């Protein structure tokens, strides 16, 4: 089955049957939307079981899920009826658990799912876990979000809740037809623009040498290259070629490379100090490996501790991302100086 060759037809949807998995079809809407369905027979009547959109679930996963549905049918069950019963009595806690399983399988695309999951566990489940999704109203969302003191956390929690509801509606796992998070106002936030001054640069560079060796080198590299902290933490020697750091846009599971945030491949020239750091690390594979062999972590905590030792006020503390922002400002100022 070549999914990309399936073109929409004007007037009505049509089906394309999979040649390997019995019962699996792609339904192509006139709008171009393609969805996986499983069609089986129950009491001599066809039953349709919705799996998900083609752009969210790959062919191999669709075949696996369709196979599970057909196993239930062979056991005398009616999967679509079971799903409808679950929708009628489904709670937000159950829907959130299903969404978590989905997000875990798609974590290469959704790199922030773990952060969202923590917000759901902390703020949403204690209040909504046992509530039926059909009973959650926009007023409930406003009240819950309004009780979260930190504006940014409130906005992030609202986004996490909205993602769960939207997914549940799209996958027909809830009787809701309208996401209750729609039209709930986000808090206004001021975009943080912390740039290290020239005097601070030397202070922080020295401070990097007084924390853990790997952590300090990772923070130095972050300031030198201006790349995202997560990408620097996952830097691999396999991706260093002829003085360039070549970053694949897509994940490379065998190398534990998560892919770039925008899924676009790009490369960065490594200046002499960065090359010296690579030599000093004297490693193959992950350059900045943590104690358990995975990518270094805890850089935010290291930056907080450095700021405390330097006597920087709490509201002026710098983060790993601020090092990236500082690098960008430095490059811009150097370019302007050269042009002048």
Image (cartoon, rainbow, N blue to C red):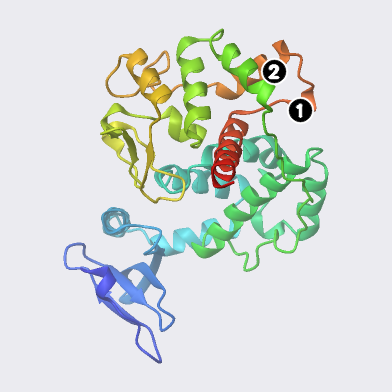
Which residue matches tag 2?
Answer: 307
The structure residue drawn at horizontal position 44% and vertical position 42%, both measured from the top left corner, is 104
Which residue matches tag 1?
Answer: 316
The structure residue drawn at horizontal position 72% and vertical position 45%, both measured from the top left corner, is 191
Q: Is residue 224 above or below residue 114?
A: above
Query: Is 184 situated left or right of 271 in this image?
Result: right
SS at badge 1: helix
Q: Does the CB distance between marks 2 and 1 fall below 8 Å?
A: yes
Q: Is residue 70 above or below residue 149?
A: below
Q: Whole-Å distance between the Cαs marked 2 and 1? A: 9 Å
Q: How many numbered marks does the figure carry?
A: 2
Query: Is 268 situated left or right of 144 in this image?
Result: left
Mark 2 or 1 closer to N-term? Answer: 2
Name the image quarter holding residue 174. bottom right
Residue 71: give x, y in percent of width and height: 27, 54
Badge 2 crowding class, 10 Å Cα cut-off, few under 14, some 14 to 19, many 20 or more, is some
Residue 137: give x, y in percent of width and height: 75, 59
Q: Which of 125 and 185 is in front in this view?
A: 185
The structure residue drawn at horizontal position 58% and vertical position 29%, both measured from the top left corner, is 320
Badge 1 crowding class, 10 Å Cα cut-off, few under 14, some 14 to 19, many 20 or more, is few
Label at residue 15: none
Query: The N terminus lies in which quarter of the figure?
Result: bottom left
Query: Is 299 situated left or right of 290 in this image?
Result: right
Work out which residue is located at the far front of the displayed protein and give it: 340
Residue 305: give x, y in percent of width and height: 66, 14
SS at badge 2: helix
Q: In this view, does 187 lie above or below 215?
A: below
Q: Which of 187 and 9 is in front in this view?
A: 187
The structure residue drawn at horizontal position 60% and vertical position 24%, both measured from the top left corner, is 300
Q: Which of 98 and 202 is in front in this view?
A: 202
Residue 115: give x, y in percent of width and height: 58, 37
């Amino acid at each position: 089955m070549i999914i990309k060759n399936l073109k929409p037809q004007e007037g009505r949807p049509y089906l394309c049957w999979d040649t390997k998995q019995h019962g699996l079809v792609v339904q192509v809407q006139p709008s171009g939307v393609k969805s996986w369905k499983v069609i089986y027979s129950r009491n001599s009547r066809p039953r349709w079981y919705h799996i998900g959109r083609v752009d969210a679930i790959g062919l191999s996963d669709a075949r696996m899920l369709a196979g599970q549905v057909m196993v239930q049918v062979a056991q005398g069950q009616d999967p679509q009826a079971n799903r409808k019963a679950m929708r009628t009595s489904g709670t937000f806690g159950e829907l959130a658990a299903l969404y978590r399983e989905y997000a875990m399988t798609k974590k290469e695309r959704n790199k922030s799912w773990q952060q969202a999951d923590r917000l759901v566990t902390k703020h949403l489940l204690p209040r909504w876990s046992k509530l039926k999704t059909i009973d959650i109203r926009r007023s409930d969302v406003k009240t819950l979000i309004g009780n979260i003191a930190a504006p940014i956390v409130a906005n992030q929690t609202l986004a996490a809740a909205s993602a769960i509801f939207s997914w549940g509606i799209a996958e027909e796992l809830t009787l809701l037809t309208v996401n209750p998070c729609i039209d709930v106002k986000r808090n206004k936030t001021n975009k943080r623009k912390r740039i290290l001054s020239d005097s601070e640069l030397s202070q922080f560079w020295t401070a990097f040498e007084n924390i853990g060796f790997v952590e300090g080198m990772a923070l130095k590299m972050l300031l030198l290259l201006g790349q995202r902290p997560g990408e620097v933490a996952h830097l691999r020697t396999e991706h260093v070629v002829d003085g360039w750091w070549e970053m694949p846009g897509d994940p490379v599971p065998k190398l534990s490379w998560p892919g770039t945030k925008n899924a676009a491949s790009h490369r960065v020239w490594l200046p002499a100090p960065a090359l010296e750091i690579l030599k000093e690390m004297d490693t193959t594979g992950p350059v900045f490996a943590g104690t358990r062999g995975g990518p270094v972590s805890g850089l935010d905590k290291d930056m907080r501790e450095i700021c405390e030792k330097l006597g920087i006020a709490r509201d002026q503390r710098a983060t790993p991302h601020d090092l990236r922002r500082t690098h960008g400002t430095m490059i811009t100022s150097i370019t302007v100086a050269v042009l002048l």
